[in-house]
Image (cartoon, rainbow, N blue to C red):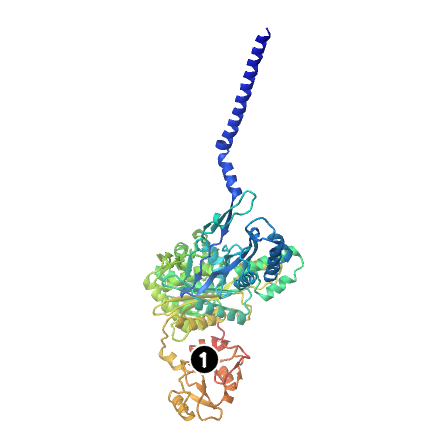
Amino acid sequence: MAKGTTVRMWKRATIVMLVVVFAGFGIAFASVFKVAIVDGKELQERAIDQTLRNTSLSAKRGSIYDCNGAVLAESASVWTVILEPAYIEDDETRLLIARGLSEILDMDEDIILEKTKLQNYYTYLKREVETDVKDQILKFMSDNEISRGILLEEAYKRYYPNGSVGSVVLGFTGTDNQGLSGIEAQYDAELSGTAGKLVTAKNAIGTNMPFEYEQNIPAQDGYNLRLSIDKTVQSVLEKYLEEGIRNSLVANGATAILMDVKSGAIKGLAVKGDFDPNDPFEITDPTVRAEIEKIEDDDEYNDAFNNALQTQWRNKGVSDTYFPGSVFKMVTGSIGLELGVINENTGYNCTGAFYFDNGIPPQYCWSYGHGFESFVEGLCNSCNPFFIYIGQLIGPHDFYRYFDSFGFTKKTGIDLPGEAGSIYFDEDELNVAELATVSYGQNFAITPIQMITACAAVANGGYLLEPYVVEQITDSEGNVIRSSGRTVKRQVISQNVSERMIAILNRNATVGTAKNGYVAGYRICGKTGTSEKVTKWNQDLLENPDAEMTYIASYCGFAPADDPQYALLMMFDEPMAANYYGGSVAGPVFARAMEELLPYLGVERVYSESERAHACGAAPNVTGVSVEEAQEDAGDLGYSTIVLGSGETVIDQIPYEGASIPAEGTIVLYTDNTSLSKRETVPDFTGSTLYNANELAKMNNLQIEAGGAAANSLVVMASGQDLMPGEKVRPGTVVKVTFIEIDQVN
């Protein structure tokens, strides 16, 4: 009995034991299966994450060059200072490193000391350290025989060597080296490159393993950009914009665009005010900065500060819209000629206003009435009623069709960020009154880049081109990745109409309302514009019933008439001087800029017979000879002389050899060292007639080179000069004075 019970109990125990064993193995197998199969991938990744550390290696951002290879933006080496605590063997060395680096890096010694005690091989200490600081660290390590414990890793920082020149076009980068505006933002993907990686392994206690366990995946440098922009052109445009802003008290900035009419390449796109991309978060306008600093409320201060930044970063040439005003008449005239509803001899009698038949209020001319005039005379007079008449002849259907064809209903596609769209009337909205106002450039808004592109089409045979600023993208080895060039969208007007409009616009710049933009010898074609800022005025009236209308003054033209190559639009936003008209504000600045730019760009100066009689020449070399011989040589060329000093030999002269000298001008001969120190004060010629300016120059032992309307108008007034009043110069110096026609309106 007992034996049977024992056997049964043994069997039961065995069964229980087997069940337990199999259950245990089952649970273990299930756990292994879960770990190895179900959760295997996740656990594997977690294990790798715990044993590997990835450190991003900065890619060098591509450089930006102008069309001649001058650097506009580049990334230069800076250094990241890294500690390797695991290699620092004792407290004495830790203290030495902390003390030395705190002095070099201007950091707290205790903070550095704590970092030296960490159990790893890689701890960031300071970023973007300049090369001179890096050299100090290397010297410190050498002097103290420190071979490990401090690591210097190369990184990159963006620099703009020309400061504010072209800043609105170039844009800038942020602290992470990402493009935030301008070309830097538009081409960020091409410029930024691909970051590399430094992969380091960690041991069981979490510290980095030595160098042999590292894997270095190098960064790939970004592509380089070569622009169509010419740094010299850009600088000249910005210089004259500043002059125009100063002379006409311009309140809301200015922009200028120079385009190659045959390719669409933008040679210069200038905006004032602007900023320094090396320090883009600094408010550059001292007046604006001072006003912001007065604000005590934090929220109001932040809003004002951010608005000021956005304003100085904004590209007015691409992102702002405006009423083009009378410069648009070159488009209306081209449409009329193309459709055949007018020709050069089409007549109209301007009584001072255009009167409608259906009760619509009349629209007025800037003049009291031009009387009977041909189309050519109407454009040269900038007669609004005549262009209303032309608009009615064209009709809403054809006007809208050509308005669209000239590119005013769509963005130009220029490769810059933030291009604005235009605001215009659709065909079914062009009733009699609206058609009247748009025909002379009011009541619709376009961008300056659209206007200069349309002007180029008028000049180049009628071809609407896509403007561009990036000519070529290359890799770090110079291989061309992508190129840009002439892109024709369509032909808007015929070659015949283009040639006829060129002749009319050339006449306008010679004898018409655009003569203030005239430059002798360069066959300028031009049109002025004075447009009302109606929308802004309506808004101002809500706060101030006495608010006055503000204006935009512009001049749009191209040269030379016999073979147009470059078109220039200059626009000044809200000139506050008494004379705010386009011809008076923008015309002289256009002339000064073109006179400097066209010879630089290789456009030959060809004088007419009348121009040649008044043209300045190049001063001869009369130094190193006797006074008598110098006087004889100068006299043979039609120049008089003034002798300063008591010497018998000419040791210097003004104007210098090759410098501009007026016809029948004077060469001052210096004969001793005492005479070389003599100085005269440049007077303020502004407001002088041509005769008075010459007399004022003589009184101060100076001479003037008369530019602008002085060559083709008898009644002129000085509006600007290249040397500032009060400047000290040597006797005989030639001051370039720009003249405008008095009572010039448009």
Q: In the image, residue 453 lies at what x, y percent?
A: 41, 61
Name the image quarter holding the N terminus: top right
Q: In the image, residue 418 lies at what x, y percent?
A: 48, 55
For residue 434, say whether it is visible: yes
Is 233 placed above or below 714 here?
Answer: above
Residue at the extreme left of the image, as rendered = 496
Q: Secondary structure at mark 1?
A: strand
Decide which of 516, 669 is in the foreground and name it: 669
Residue at 51% from the left image edge and 33% from the top image edge: 39
Quadrant position of residue 227: bottom left
Residue at the extreme right of the image, as rendered = 296
Decide which of 48, 38 is in the foreground and name it: 48
Is 359 placed above or below 653 here?
Answer: above
Residue at the extreme top of the image, as rendered = 1
| Tag 1: amino acid | Glu
For residue 433, say whether it is visible: no
Is 693 placed above or below 574 here?
Answer: below
| Category of crowding for the residue at label 1, using alpha-carbon neighbours closer than 10 angstroms: few (below 14), some (14–19), many (at least 20) | many
Decide which of 428, 270 is in the foreground and name it: 270
Q: In the image, residue 193 lies at what x, y percent?
A: 45, 53
Q: Is residue 491 left or right of residue 545?
A: left
Decide which of 678, 306 is in the foreground and name it: 678
Quadrant position of residue 456: bottom left
Q: Which residue is mark 1?
A: 705
Residue at the extreme front of the image, as rendered = 3
Residue at 61% from the left image edge and 51% from the top image edge: 117
Q: In the image, residue 660 lies at what x, y percent?
A: 42, 80
Quadrant position of residue 144: bottom right
